[in-house]
Image (tube, rainbow, N blue to C red):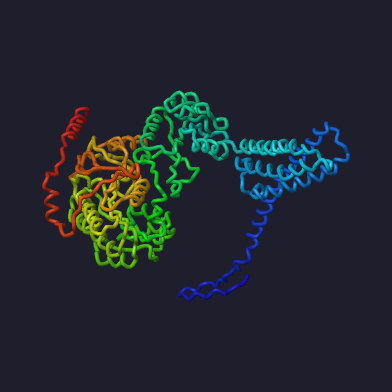
Amino acid sequence: MEAVRAPVLECCVPLRRYTAIRYDESVPPPAAEGRRTSARLAAVVRFGSRYLVDAAAWIVGLSLAIWFRYAFDVPTDAYFPVTMLILVTLFGQLLFGFVFELYRGRFSFGSLEEVRALGVAVAFVAVCLGVPVLLLGSGYGVPRSIFLIATPLALVAMFSVRFVKRLLIEQRNAPKEGVTRTLVYGAGVLGSSLVRQMLSDPTTLYRPVGLIDDDPAKRQSQVRDVRVLGAFNDLPRIVERTRAQFLVVAVPRADSTLLRLVQDMAMQLDLTVKVVPTLSDILAGRSGTGTIRDISIEDLIGRHPVDTDLSTIAGYLTGRRVLVTGAGGSIGLELCKQIAGFGPSELVMLDRDETGLQQAQLATAGHGLLNTKDVVLCDIRDAPALDEVLIARRPEVVFHAAALKHLPMLEQYPDEAWKTNVLGTLNVINAARLAEVDTFINVSTDKAANPTSVLGHSKRVAEKLTAWAADDSGFRYLSVRFGNVIGSRGSMLPTFQSLIEAGGPLTVTHPDVTRYFMTIPEACQLVIQAGAIGRPGEILILDMGEPVRILDVAKRMIAMSGKQIEIAFTGLREGEKLHEELVGVREKLERPFHPMISHTRADTIPPTRLDHDGWMARMFAEPRVNDTAVLEAHRAQKEHKA
């Protein structure tokens, strides 16, 4: 350990001198060394005690075997050879115990894995010693049948000790009084493990009092003392019988439709619904493996479990240079997080929003220093700067997520949509072609299908430009189209939540308006999957499930808040549709590769045919005044009631 004098800091205010102590990292500090010594000693005691249990079991088993063999009248000349055999057996158990990691801390006490390893170790001991004894034992005064008798006795003793200790541990860790009586919906692997965890955690807030499962084969099942009490339709009877207060949904692939059904039933029975996070949430670090959380509005309208083909995704992302435009936005940020998990050789995050880039860097690199080459501050409207970036970085895959996306704002400023969504996309395409990018994924929107808004028309042109680039270059340039994502900046749900917190009123455009919804992580999973299976010039359309009525969402959010909030109808805004569409009238769909991704061919438009004035004229040729007759009827009915 070496002491080094720190330099004196010169300042207008006198500072004290401090001594900096630099430790030699090869020499551990005394406290750390003491902790390590204690840990090693505890491990020796813990796993040594397991060996002593097994050794005692062999001693008892072999002793009983010799007594049984000689009908409790053991000749004196058998004592010495049997004693030697016991010692050799104990050594064999120690040896094979270490070979199969019984005494090295790999298995938790009494677990199925430990029992399996114990059985294999005992079998090896019995075979390695039992066969020689069977062949040669009589010549040394050892009964040949001793291991045939002793092995099952010893094994039963070892299992019994572990079983009793496990019961004592579980009883000690069982939930104490005052916890909430809870039903678990789902008696599969997830539900069963959840019940075991609840019963083994002394700090848990939940006491499982029953399982629910719709599979008739599980009707007589039970986990520990918790039985399957019936199917979901039996929930009213089960709640009355068990006096449960919570219902935890532990169905691995529970989608929005199922969760809405559960929530509606639970509200009638005054049950609080909890959910177990999805596997994607756990893998992405948004939830822990043991987390039980309240059901959210996102679960009720946007949960669509996604199956991804990891091998095809890894084939075009792993070890390759990937660039994401709009990396600071909601979609771009999630794309960056998921792409980083596939191990690209380089991930370049491009945006004009420096704060958004910092969030992207925090999510992917674990810091927001903004002083590394993985973040690029650039505007896609600036073609020369964009060319310079892509030529210098040479990405092989580009995800183009940068866009202006707020429909009513673009209705006021259509030129901005043209500059960003049309010309900006063309700039990215041209730069990608200069850099010889072989895979280009343009992130589109359902507004581009039979467009009626500035946003939809601009994104439709972006799809056509992408298809043109595919035809002209022969590379995989394609678009991915999907509907609303939940939780993005400025989207419906955060807006509704803010209005509810402010006391209302909660504004809805129309009582019959519907929209497609999907969570951002699930949408990005499908975007990345689409990039693996899409063919040049295609539009890939994500399966968004059934459209959801916005008024129903508003009512659910108000009910979940527990407040009395008024709903006010404002009328559809210019360019808005009553019901969104994912597919254009002339588009024909096929699903050749993935059950949640449809393929269609896009029309093309070369850059030479881009005409701003013609685009504006076609877009505003139709009257853009929405019918408000339904709203007037609602207002009249409300005034009549008043």
Q: Quadrant of residue 109?
A: top right
Q: Is residue 156 left or right of residue 393?
A: right
Q: Quadrant of residue 127?
A: top right
The residue at the point 36 percent across, 62 percent down is 375
Question: Total marks drawn?
Answer: 0
The residue at the point 65 percent across, 62 percent down is 30
Tell me, yes or no, if residue 498 can be seen here.
no
Percent of width and height locating residue 626: 16, 40
Q: Quadrant of the C terminus?
A: top left
Percent of width and height locating residue 169: 63, 39
Q: Is residue 333 above or below residue 394?
A: above
Percent of width and height locating residue 164: 67, 36
Tell me, yes or no, if residue 15 can be seen here.
yes
View extreme (front): residue: 135
Q: Is residue 401 left or right of residue 309?
A: left
View extreme (right): residue: 76
Q: Is residue 457 left or right of residue 335?
A: left
Q: Quadrant of residue 415?
A: bottom left
Q: Is residue 345 left or right of residue 99?
A: left
Percent of width and height locating residue 437: 31, 61
Q: Is residue 642 above or below residue 280?
A: above
Residue 359 vs residue 165, the one in the foreground: 165
Q: Quadrant of the N terminus?
A: bottom right
Residue 327 vs residue 272, the one in the foreground: 327
Residue 640 vs residue 517, the one in the foreground: 517
The residue at the point 26 percent across, 38 percent down is 514
Residue 226 vs residue 594, the one in the foreground: 594
The residue at the point 62 percent across, 72 percent down is 2
